[in-house]
Image (tube, rainbow, N blue to C red):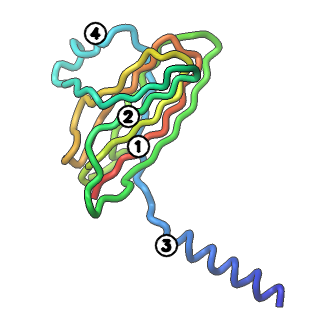
Amino acid sequence: MARFHITLACILLATACAAAPEHDQIGLSVEVIDDITEYLAKYPESEITPLRVVVSPIPPFRTRYVLGTRVKGDRVLAIRNDNVFYPTRRDIRLDLHYPQYGTGGIVTLIDIAVEQSSDLGRAYIVAGGIGQRQIKFVVEARDVYHLSTNTTIYGY
């Protein structure tokens, strides 16, 4: 009887895993930056779109960047989690883009939760955006030795 229950549990687990929706990947490149003005001069077609920001007042500093709103029928299109440590403080720039390959779903909301060792940073959209099938955005953190990001993109 115990074998039957174990077998049944394995079958149910395999079925649940197979039925779970797959998420697209969010591409990432990490670049240490000195000046956003230089970046804009190098990529003049870029447009900076600020995101809504909520920051915690004590370390580790937690910041949430949000752009867009959930809409009826949307779902998670992509998730990405990153966690980096450095031996000394530095400025970090994360360049993220969705979709990683091919054509993505229509983006309705982007939610980036950041934990870092300083309260200096920002996030902004440089290409694509809400209502489009692709989005490229930047997360900057200044004077940090630790940076953790949890990014979720919703759409349909």
Distance between the alpha carbons at the discs numbered 4 and 3:
46 Å
- In the figure, residue 8 lies in which quadrant? bottom right
Mark 4 vs 3, N-terminal side? 3
Q: Residue at x 26, y 43 (%)?
A: 68
Q: Secondary structure at mark 2?
A: strand
Looking at this view, name the residue that lies furthest to the left: 45
Q: Amino acid at mark 3?
A: Ala
Which of the two residues, 44 or 146, is positioned nearer the viewer here? 146
Disc number for residue 26: 1
Mark 1 vs 4, N-terminal side? 1
- In the figure, residue 94 lies in which quadrant? top left
Which residue was labeled with disc 2?
96
Which residue was labeled with disc 3?
19
Which residue was labeled with disc 4?
38
Mark 1 vs 3, N-terminal side? 3
Left or right, residue 107 beside residue 139: left
Q: Are marks 3 and 2 in contact (CB under 8 Å)?
A: no
